[in-house]
Amino acid sequence: MLKGKVAAVTGGQRGIGRAICEKLAEYGADIAIIDMCDENAARETASAIESKGVKVRAYRCDVTDGASVKETFKAILADFGTIDILVNNAGITKDKLAMMMSEDDFEKVLDVNLSGAFRTSKEVIPVMLKKHSGKIINISSISGIIGNAGQVNYSASKAGLIGMTKSLARELASRNITCNAVAPGFVETDMTKNLPDGGKTLADSIPLRRFAKPEEIAGLVAFLASPAADYITGEVIRIDGGLAM
Ligand code: NDP
């Protein structure tokens, strides 16, 4: 389904990002992993994905550093020749009630989750414009749709991503480039592993009574990256077990 396509995934070394890399590779896409992780971790992820028979390279890059993002995309283009799919997945949390939250913690989360996606998108847009095709997929969150106490920074960044998704979709549609957002609820990753009572109370509040597995988010991203989604743009798809309906 994605054979011959090149996908760049930020935060692709672990968690949801890694599952996305694996799923896109299963469908035949070559993979550029963009992450801040150390070389050993990157090598381990890359070789797991390579075993699916596609080309994989890992790039050490901090999405808050504009120069590093530029260099990374230059290197990806030199190594792969093109980019067809960009998944903006890198994200962090720094949770606190608003009155206790420092301005620094507010800005840091915005810088990674929102401005990071802007920086990477800017690098792929000229490539996709020339090809008259491309798919940009932003990993938002239901926190960006319904808000969440203790997450004014995170919710603002994820709501911002939804606005950016819709504006990019409008800017790029005439060149056959789609831009969509995925809004997960709670997913079993490092980001949610330290919740009180192991997340049980939260899970009980979800209609489907459990957190999502990273592979389930990856399946939706792979669908949006595939030709089956060619007529979908500017959309935000919740994948939350019914939590925010
Ligand atoms: P993890 O914390 O497990 O992984 C986050 C990934 O992002 C890591 O690979 C990390 O790299 C990378 N990353 C963080 N900061 C940067 C940066 N400045 N530059 C480059 N890469 C960076 O998170 P999840 O897999 O859980 O989350 C992935 C995305 O899904 C995030 O955007 C998150 O907000 C979103 N999401 C997650 C939910 C959940 O319940 N888990 C729910 C809704 C949305 P490194 O390994 O080097 O630290």
Image: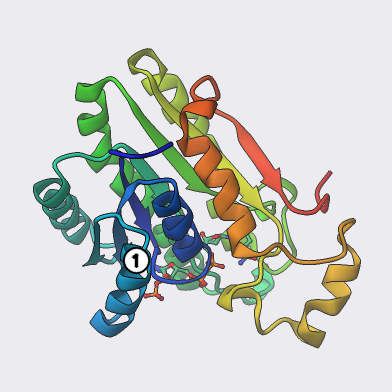
Q: Which type of secondary structure does the marked residue at label 1 adopt?
A: loop
Q: Residue at x 55, y 24 (%)?
A: 232
Asked where in the image residue 48 lies, by quadrant, the reply is bottom left
Residue 108 left/right relative to 78: right
Q: Residues within 10 Å of mark 1 (few under 14, many from 20)?
A: few
On the image, the x and y values in percent for residue 185 come to 71, 57
On the image, the x and y values in percent for residue 206 come to 86, 60
Residue 86 left/right relative to 228: left
Work out which quarter of the rendered image holds the C terminus and state it. Answer: top right
Asked where in the image residue 132 lies, by quadrant, the reply is top left
Work out which quarter of the rendered image holds the N terminus and state it. Answer: top left
Residue 75 left/right relative to 152: left
On the image, the x and y values in percent for residue 173 come to 41, 18
Q: Residue at x 45, y 65 (%)?
A: 18
Mark 1 vs ligand 1: CB under 8 Å?
Answer: no
Q: Residue at x 12, y 54 (%)?
A: 75
Name the residue nearer the viewer: 97 or 111. 111
Q: Residue at x 72, y 81 (%)?
A: 195
Residue linked to disc 1: 51
Q: Is residue 170 above or below residue 23?
A: above
User: Which amino acid, by three-letter code, is at mark 1?
Assistant: Ser
Residue 6 left/right relative to 114: left
Total label count? Answer: 1
On the image, the x and y values in percent for residue 47 come to 31, 72
Asked where in the image residue 54 lies, by quadrant, the reply is bottom left
Answer whether residue 155 is visible to the viewer in this image.
Answer: no
Q: Is residue 71 above or below residue 41?
A: above
Answer whether residue 116 is visible to the viewer in this image.
Answer: yes
